[in-house]
Image: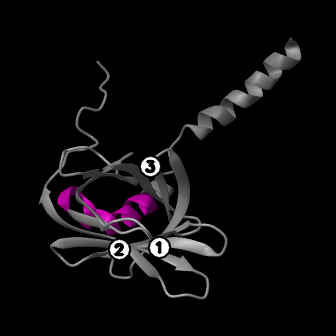
Amino acid sequence: MKIALAALALALPAAAQAQHADKAAMAAQVEAAHRLDWMHGKWRGEARMKMPGAPEQVVTHTERVGTLLDGTITVIEGKAFNPDGSVPFNAFAVVSYDPQTKTYLMNSHTGGRSGNFPLTVSETGKGYVWEVPAGPKAKVRYTAVFDGTTWTETGDFVAEGQPGRPFFKMVLKRVGDSDWPMAGSMTRD
């Protein structure tokens, strides 16, 4: 019993220290997140997907984007609507920045699948590229560009040694501000 109490006494200061925020890391994360500020708000437009052997699918696509954790992470929800109002696609992602490695990471969830994928923000900050493994020696590459009024994102299937094969394109216009995800957050009372 004395050994357990001694171990607990030694562990408590370390646990308490782990609860303190790393202000320098948070400042670097906020600064890095600002490179994606153009994404904040509500977006709507058209998305087209063409898979081999299937007809092209055209949907109304929406995105809503905001920040959490004092602006250190960017959260994104993408949702598509068929003409009848049904939802064929819904995704959620968190973009974070690691100040030690100076890299962005997208943690993406959709359709029962999830993963962590490197995200490269363009030099201008007005776009990004991220890739998802798609089998042996293949990947899906998503490339986004913001031209000041329009968010265009394309998806290409890329097999090693071959040019990319486009299969997805969305073209969105910003339709308004969003207080998501902060609106409705829990309060002390």
Q: CA distance from mark 2 to mark 3?
A: 17 Å
Q: CA distance from mark 1 to mark 2?
A: 8 Å
In this view, 75 is above or below 4: below
Q: Nearer the viewer, residue 45 or 37?
A: 45
In this view, 184 is above or below 158: above
The residue carrying mark 3 is 110
In this view, 145 is above or below 46: below
Q: Secondary structure at mark 2?
A: strand
Q: Is residue 118 magenta?
A: no
Quadrant of residue 188 within the rendered picture: top left
Amino acid carrying label 3: it is: Thr
- Tell me what residue is drawn at x 63 percent, y 67 percent: 135
For the C terminus, the image quarter is top left
Q: Secondary structure at mark 1?
A: strand
Among the two numbered marks 3 and 1 on one chain, the one whose residue lies closer to the N terminus: 3
Q: Which residues are magenta?
A: 27-45
Q: What label does residue 54 carry, if any?
A: none
Q: Residues within 10 Å of mark 3 (few under 14, many from 20)?
A: some
Quadrant of residue 155 within the rendered picture: bottom left
Q: What label does residue 154 carry, if any?
A: 2
- Tell me what residue is drawn at x 60 percent, y 88 percent: 161
Instruction: Where is residue 141? Give x, y as percent.
Output: 47, 73
Amino acid carrying label 1: it is: Arg
For the N terminus, the image quarter is top right
Q: CA distance from mark 3 to mark 1?
A: 16 Å
> Magenta region, mostly helix, strand or loop?
helix
Q: Residues within 10 Å of mark 1 (few under 14, many from 20)?
A: some
Among the two numbered marks 1 and 2 on one chain, the one whose residue lies closer to the N terminus: 1
The residue carrying mark 1 is 141
Q: Secondary structure at mark 3?
A: strand
Q: Nearer the viewer, residue 83 or 99?
A: 83
- Tell me what residue is drawn at x 37 percent, y 62 percent: 33
